Amino acid sequence: MLSPLGYHRAVLAYVRRVDERAWAALRGGPVGRLDDVLLRNAYRLEESVHPEVHQAGRRAAEALGVDTELSFFQVDGAAPNAHYVHQAGAAVVVFEGSLLEKLDHDDLTAVMGHELAHRVLWHADDGDYLAVDRLLDAAAGDARTPQQYLETHRRWSLATELFADRGALTACGDLSVTIRALLKLQTGLSTADPEAYLRQADELDLSTGSRGTSHPEGVARAWALKNWLAGDDMESLITGPLDIDAPDLLDAVLLRDLSREFAASIAHTSGLRTDAVATFAAGFSDPPGPLGVPASTTPRFDEPLAVRPIDGAPLPRPRPLVDATKRYLCYLLLDLATADPDTGDDGLVASMVIARRAGLTAYDDLADDELGWSDKRRAKLAKAADEVVG
């Protein structure tokens, strides 16, 4: 059976805790029956004339456990496409352009599975995920919405499409067929080579995350399906590295906790263990507290960072840090290293030791740029730090 992705579950848990009233107000099933606009502007594909469409729809619905009336429509469109319309009492799939002319029965079953999987997700857990989807959609349409919500909406959309792709694979039961259908829909071609597309995916490092706005790139979707079928983790495609310049709601929590942890670690370091530094560190959390490691332990930032799951979601894969995030951590370290003038050079050397142990290789240059060291003084401080690290 299909189950929501870890990202879905983590965002749901966060929204229920932080935006409970808004989330609760948007819970509930689809409103109304078949849209009058659809009836006025689309052609209904009746089974007597289009039996192959209904056969593929029933096959996909049975595989996904969708037990409801199915309706299919065709509308004009420049590009081949299909989308699901969430209606009360019926699962509605709308086709655009020449898509149906390009699909054989198995391809069509995969496309049906993708679209009907949206209904599976919206009905899961009594409509909880539908409520989050509505909340994020509403937020994305408001110019006042903070960037963190917009990035969450983007990643949520990516996760939802990957879930729907799993529905396509579940419906037709064949990875090659699923990717072939994806390629036909994406390119408009009547024939496509799924194996060649998977070889193309192997040429990319897709663990760096998708750059898509509503759908992952097609090659990334093929890669994710292959990984899912093999039982491997693929949610790094959604989250990507930890980037302080583009956090979603979950990353914002993680970055706050990471800042608190690192500040606490700095404040416990010999040479910087003063009341002034501790007071500054407490500003990141009152009182400073750990994020899965003791405050006296310096984390490594030059390798993927092991992070705790958010709100009980599955343990995520360690997250690499982009340069902007490392630069932010360098500034955090420098701020604490200079928070108490009485620490003098001992405090600066201690901060350079921390930077070396944390893998913040840009720290010396950044500190030099900000503090204006002479070459002689920088060399002296660096030598002292290197002697401590050994």
Image (cartoon, rainbow, N blue to C red):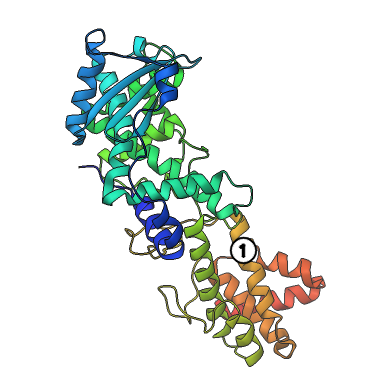
Q: Quadrant of residue 336?
A: bottom right
Mark 1 crowdedness (10 Å alpha carbons): few <14, some 14-19, many ≥20: some
Mark 1 lies on residue: 361
Q: Position of residue 41 (x, y in %)?
A: 45, 17
Residue in the picture at 24% in, 23% down: 57
168 sits left or right of 16 in the view? left
Q: Position of residue 27 (x, y in %)?
A: 37, 51
Q: Quadrant of the C terminus?
A: bottom right
Q: Name which residue lies at 51% across and 14% down.
A: 78
- Relative depth, front residue between 5 and 77: 77
Question: Where's the N terminus, which quadrant?
Answer: top left
> 12 left or right of 54?
right
All told, the count of numbered labels is 1
- State whether residue 381 appears in this view: yes
Q: Residue furthest top?
A: 49
- Residue 258 percent across, percent down from the top left: 51, 69
